[in-house]
Each structure stands twice: as structure tokens, then as C-alpha cells.
Amino acid sequence: MIQISPSVLSADLAKLYDECVAIDAAGADLIHLDVMDGAFVPNLTFGAPVIKGARPATKLPFDVHLMINEPIRYIADFAKAGADILTVHIEACSDLGATIDAIRAAGVRVGVSVKPNTPAEALFPWLDKIDMALVMTVEPGFGGQGLIEETLPKIAALRAEADRCGLALDIEVDGGIKAENIGHVASFGANIFVAGSSVFGKPDRAAAIATLRAAAEQ
């Protein structure tokens, strides 16, 4: 099933609570929250206290993307703050197995992401231990970038391996998603789409989400 996860990186963060209320009313399936540490990626955003403050705004799942080094240190904090999905980067974990175990022990769903230059095959040994694979279709750290077309075959490779293993894996795509390309991206096997400026940058967010969903389902 196609799901749209608007990224608050493109929202008005000074009004994050209200933005979460509005995007829920606009028909989002999840809310994507990008946590950046200024080390793993060249930008800073927010931490667990901000997520905790926004949590009462909506019952939608909080899709929390940890773009931070050694995220195992903060798994419990983000789970307590209200994350429903915690996605870590394979490149940022010295012990990915222990990190996955920590997320599972915290009672939330497990996601693992790969950057554009990391092959899909790096995730293959972990697919039976996770709920979601996140393919970055831009370099992580900044919103508003253009989609890197060369990353898309990784989606198909992950879907084929999940199917071969009989796994009901969610595959999320993050970066440069817009109405003009979401159908093409979906054709590779993705089912969850992070959308920042293509939702929050539109005057009618409900129409923007509906347009993305319809284009992905074609």
C-alpha cells in the first residue's frame, strides 16, 4: 500500500506542533522527522525533546530518521519521545546488530537506511531483522535536492531480495520525490515516500498529498 510521509524538514519548525496537526488533517500516512547531528551529515536539526513536544499533536506514526553517528546511544530517548519507527544508517553504526536489537527492545519498528553510494546488497543480511529499508535518493543532510536516478535500481534489488526471502518489507524512498517522478520511483518497488517541499511547499497540502498518492498508484 502506498504511504506518504511528509518531512517536517520543509515545515515551519517554529510551529511544529501546528504543522503536525495540519499535515494529519491533509491526509498524511506518517510524519517524517529528520534528526541530524552535524557530524554524520553537515546539518543540525532537533533531538528527542522536540519530538516529545510534537507527539500530542497527532496519532499518526512518527517516522524518525536518525542521521547521527552511533545512534544506539539515543534509541531509548527517541522511543520514549514518541517515535513509532526508528531508522538508522548502516554507515553510522559500528554494531548494526546491537542497534537493531536496541530498537526492537524499545518497542518500536526498525528501519535501516543506505546513502546513495552504499550498495543495496549491504542490507541483504539484515532484511529478516528489520521492518523497513530506506533508500536515500539524495545525499542526506539537506532538503530540496534533486533525485539521483542512479539510486533507483537499489529499490528493485531490495524488493527482489525481500520477495525471494518471503519478507513483507516496507521500502521507503527519501529525496527529491515529487508528483512528476513518484510513479517512476514506485515502479521499482517502493511503497513509502518521504516528501518535503512537494507537500509543505504547496498552498493546498491535502491536494499535494492526494496528487502524490494518485501518481504513485498509477
Image: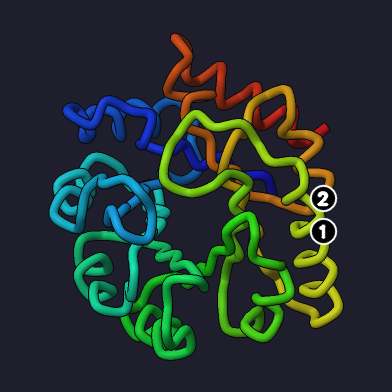
Residue nearest the observer in this picture, 88 or 30: 88
Q: How many marks?
A: 2
Mark 2 = which residue?
188
Residue shown at the point (48%, 14%) measured from the top left: 202
Q: Mark 1: which secondary structure? A: helix
- In this rendering, would 87 be left or right of 156? left
Q: Mark 2: which secondary structure? A: loop
User: Alpha-carbon distance for marks 2 and 1?
Assistant: 5 Å
Residue nearest the observer in this picture, 209 or 134: 134
Above or below for 22 versus 194? above
Q: Amino acid at mark 1?
A: Ala
Q: Quadrant of residue 25?
A: top left
Residue shown at the point (83%, 32%) measured from the top left: 218
Q: Amino acid at mark 2?
A: Phe
Q: Which mark is residue 156?
A: 1
Q: Which mark is residue 184?
A: none
Q: Earlier in the sequence, mark 2 or mark 1?
A: 1
The answer to whether mark 2 and mark 1 are in CB contact below 8 A is yes
